[in-house]
Amino acid sequence: MKKISFKNLLLIGLIASGPMLFSCAGGEDGPAKGSPVYTVNYFDEDGTQVGYAYVPENRAASFRSMDGENYDWLPHTDMDLTTPGARFVFDKWVGTYDASFSNKVDAALDGQEVDLEHIKGDCKVVASFKEKAYKMSAVFKNCGKTYEEKTVDFGAAIAYPATNPSEEHPEYYNAYNFEGWTLDKDTSNTKVAFTSANALTNTWKDGTSGPAWGLGAPDDAKATGNCGVIYLDKTLTDHMPTYPAYLSDGTKWIEVGNLLGDKLKLEFTSKYETEYKDFQVTLTSTGGNHVSFNVKYGDEITYERVVSTNSTTLEVKYNGVSKYTYSVANTSGGVANVTYLLEGTYTNATAGITNPHSELIEGRKLGFSLEKDSNNVPTGGKVTIQGNCEIKPIIHQVNA
């Protein structure tokens, strides 16, 4: 024998006894004493009932999911999107009163639109969806810091910053010139950086010519043109695409993420043509001899430690060119019994070259990084030059 649940029994009782009477006193916007209770049936756009509500007359309906399952508020039929970069979102419930649907619908209501804030009879409503654009953003970074950030609906114009940035520390340059913004991406897997030569246009879609928006999977033909156009891959038959997004550098596709969750963010980096200043490096020997030469700011000088039968030498190089060789004799029968290193200090200008931020840099030790062999013995080192400096050798260790 089929079991009848308490819930079903209650519903049967309600049907058998006719309209439920609401016992509370009514107000201007509420149900009057003895008002009937109506049923609102909620349907998805595919015809599946997804919810219900029991509502006293003239009261607002409150949606309840069927069988306690949460409604996902998404369409379940293949509705065609008309705008690239959009997805469907729930808009509202729509419906009209139908006297043939229930005997609890007054003939005067027949054909009237259902107002879910003021229910006047049994009714059914259907989910209605609308297109809504995903959002995307562009971040413009200068010298590692955010210069400007913009977020818009996909398809809206994102203009480059109205004013050009400047180098954060111009004191390190003889000259610099802002060239534009570049979109730097991973260059592995044949992907290449998006250079200023193919900089994005101020509008982010191809609205006048070419394959508008690049709908469909990217192909080689599209990759060869339309630089600066964001192409969306809509190969999924799903009516809620995630939109993988691509740019073309003129020859190859560059993956830039997808629109799902409004997470498409393009990061641009300022690009400069620069000429760094020269700073003077002085190499001083233990005997007082010295040699000086100029090094561009940010360049490295290196040294290599070489052990021979009679001596240990340190050869200092800049841009691969030898500048000076220090030497110390081995004093234990040809055994390399010294560890010979370099140290340095930033100094005042010695040839009319001014140190940037002299109050911060002068007197500071140079930060040599050491290279060591398998026995943890230094074999050389390097240092990045940030101002005028003096470098000299030290005997780090003497082996007895």
Image (cartoon, rainbow, N blue to C red):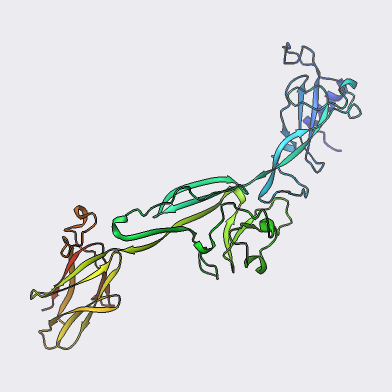
Note whether residue 185 is visible: no
Q: Please tell me in which quadrant of the rendered image residue 235 appears.
A: bottom right
The mark tally for this picture is 0
Residue at the (67%, 59%) spot, across then down: 214
Q: Position of residue 191 (x, y in %)?
A: 54, 68
Viewer-proximal residue, 212 or 242? 212
Viewer-proximal residue, 21 or 211? 211
Residue at the (54%, 62%) spot, across then down: 198
- Depicted 84 relative to depicted 396: above or below: above
Locate residue 52 relative to residue 276 in the image: left or right: right
Locate residue 347 relative to residue 13 in the image: left or right: left
Instruction: Name the image quarter holding the N terminus.
Output: top right
Q: Position of residue 109 (x, y in %)?
A: 86, 22
Residue at the (65%, 69%) spot, across then down: 220
Note whether residue 323 is visible: yes
Viewer-proximal residue, 77 or 353? 353
Q: Please tell me in which quadrant of the rendered image residue 25 appears.
A: top right
Locate residue 95 relative to residue 322 in the image: left or right: right
Q: Position of residue 87 (x, y in %)?
A: 68, 47
Give the residue furthest to the left. 287
Instruction: Name the image quarter holding the C terminus.
Output: bottom left
Give the residue furthest to the right. 100
- Depicted 396 relative to depicted 35: above or below: below
- Depicted 104 relative to depicted 344: above or below: above
